[in-house]
Amino acid sequence: MMDVIWWVLLVVGSYILTSVFFLKCPVLYKRKRLHFKCAHISHRGGGAERLENTLEAYRNAVKCGTQMLELDVHLTADDVVVVSHDDDLTRTTGESVCIKNSFYKDLPPLLNSIPVVEGVTCSRSGSPLRICTLEEVFEEFQGVPMHIDVKTFNRYLIEKTNALIKKYNRESITPWGTFSDETTAALHESNPLVPLAFSTRRVIFVICTFWFGLLPLLPIRESSFAIPMAKAVRKGLPSSYLKSLKVRIFLFFMDLLLLRKSLIKHLTDRGINVYLWVVNEEEHFREAFELGVTGVMTDYPKRLGKFLEANPKYRTEF
C-alpha cells in the first residue's frame, strides 16, 4: 500500500513540477511574432466620448493616442459590411430596423444621443451621422491596427470582411473573432493569416487547462486573448442585474479565475496579446497593467491617453 502511495506522489509531483516549469518557461512551442502590440485600445472607437463605431469616434481616438480601434461588423441585405455593434438598430437610431434585412442606403441615421453603459450617455449636436462602412474605416485609418468583432455567423460577412482586409493589406494588423466558437472557426478557416481572437469556448478551455496544469503543454492557434475585467464591467451593469446573487457570484469567480498574473505572463511569453475590457476608471487602468496585460479596451480614449502619458512604463511600444 505504501509503495502505491509513493508512486502516486511521485507521478503527481513530477506532473506538477513539469507543468510549473513549462508555465514559467514556455519553450515547447514557437513564440508568436505579431506585428502589433497595443496598450491603448478604443472600445467601439471610444463610445463615451463620441458616438460609438463612427468615423468621428475613430478620429477622436487616434487624436487621443489610441494604438488600436475595436469595432463590430454586420452585413446588409445588399452585401455591404457596416460598422455597428447591434443588428437591431433601435438603441442607436430609434427605429426598429435590422441591418441584415435592409439595404445600406435605407439604414436610418444615428441618434445624436446613444446610451453607452448604465448611467452614461454620449451626446452630440449637429446633423445626424450615418452608419459607416468597414471600407470607409479601412480607407481613412490605413496602418492603424483594428480588432474586429464579427457579430454573426454569416459566410458572406466573413468573405466580404476578409476581402476588405486583403484589399487594404491588413492581414497582419487586424485580429478578428467573436464570442461564437462556430464563427471564430469559420474566420480562421477563411484566412489563417489573420490573427485570431479567442471565442468564449476557447477562453473556458484556457482557464480549465491552466488550472489543471495542462495549458503549457498544449498548442494555441489564437493570438488575441480579450477578456472582461469583471470589476470594471460591473460598474456599467444596470443595478437590477447586480441585485442577483448569481450575477455577483459569477463576476467574483470571473476575476478570480481569469485575472491571474501567472496565466497572463504565460500567454504573453508565448507571444499572445492579452487585453481586458471594458476598462474606464484610472484605478482599473492601473490594476490591469499591474497584472501584466498587453493593453486595455476603454470607452474613454482621452482618459486612457492621459493615464498612459502620466505612466509611460505601461505604454507598449512595438
Image: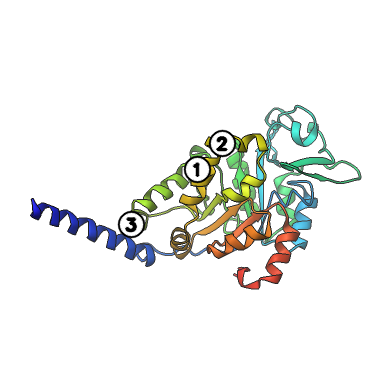
- Please give the label number shown on residue 155: 2
Q: Amino acid at mark 3?
A: Leu
The answer to whether 26 is drawn above or below residue 218 in the figure is below
Q: Is residue 23 left or right of residue 61?
A: left
- Please give the label number shown on residue 106: none
Which of the marked residues, 2 or 1, is nearer the chain's N terminus?
2
Which of the marked residues, 3 or 2, is nearer the chain's N terminus?
2
**Residue at (54%, 44%) from the top-left corner?**
251
> Along the line of sight, which residue is nearer the eye, 63 or 9?
9
For the C terminus, the quadrant is: bottom right
Alpha-carbon span between mark 3 and mark 2: 33 Å
Q: Is residue 25 left or right of residue 248?
A: left
Residue under numbered circle 3:
217
Which residue ends up furthest to the bottom in the rendered image? 313
Crowd rating for badge 2 (residues with CA inside 10 Å; few <14, some 14–19, many 20+): few
Q: Amino acid at mark 1?
A: Thr
Crowd rating for badge 1 (residues with CA inside 10 Å; few <14, some 14–19, many 20+): some
Q: Is residue 36 visible?
A: no
Mark 3: secondary structure: helix
